[in-house]
Image (cartoon, helix red, strand yellow):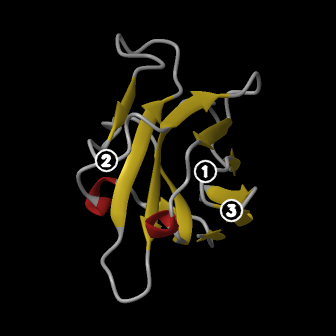
Amino acid sequence: QVHLVESGGGSVQAGGSLRLSCAASGYTSSAYCIGWFRQAPGKEREGIAAIYTGSTYTGSGTARYADSVKDRVTISQGNAKNTVYLQMNSLKPEDTGMYYCAAEIPPCIPMVEATTGYSYWGQGTQVTVSS
């Protein structure tokens, strides 16, 4: 069973930045597909960014982004590869929502297009951007 804990959410003014963290545990390897998703009130959950943290996959460390945010966010691995960060810059009020970290163990594809590629989800961290 993989356990995910998100942190780093909060309230910021438009134009500000936040860095979200996702710490994964419970798997014998440090290799995961990790995705960040967000859900605004009344809207469907949407993908933001994803990454594979393993070292043997040819796409190791390759990040994928949703087109709507790719110029403003960066997903990265921490030195401890079971931690993944989401740096968000130039935040807008429409970025407000609950942000979730999701994980899948290999074999996996780091997807942003759908939530179905992930078996494990964290509880979420709230991001509120005021104008």
Looking at the image, is 33 positioned above or below residue 63? below
| Residue 90 image point, x, y percent | 55, 45
On-image quarter of the N terminus: bottom right
Q: Label 1 is placed on what type of residue?
A: Gly
**Which disc number belongs to residue 15?**
1
Q: Tell me: 107 left or right of 52.
A: left
The residues tagged by marks 2 and 1 sit, at their Cα atoms, a distance apart of 24 Å
Question: SS at mark 3?
Answer: strand
Name the N-terminal-most of marks 2 and 1.
1
For residue 69, which quarter of the picture?
top left
| Residue 26 image point, x, y percent | 68, 50
Graded by Cα atoms within 10 Å as few (under 14), some (14 to 19) or many (20 or more), the crowding at tag 3 reads some
Q: Residue at x 67, y 27 (%)?
A: 81
**Which disc number belongs to residue 13?**
3
Name the N-terminal-most of marks 2 and 3.
3
Q: Label 3 is placed on what type of residue?
A: Gln
| Residue 86 image point, x, y percent | 59, 42
Q: Are marks 1 and 3 in contact (CB under 8 Å)?
A: yes
| Residue 13 image point, x, y percent | 68, 62
Q: Tell me: 49 left or right of 67.
A: right
The residues tagged by marks 2 and 3 sit, at their Cα atoms, a distance apart of 26 Å
For residue 7, which quarter of the picture?
bottom right
Determine which residue is flagged by label 2: 112
The residues tagged by marks 1 and 3 sit, at their Cα atoms, a distance apart of 6 Å
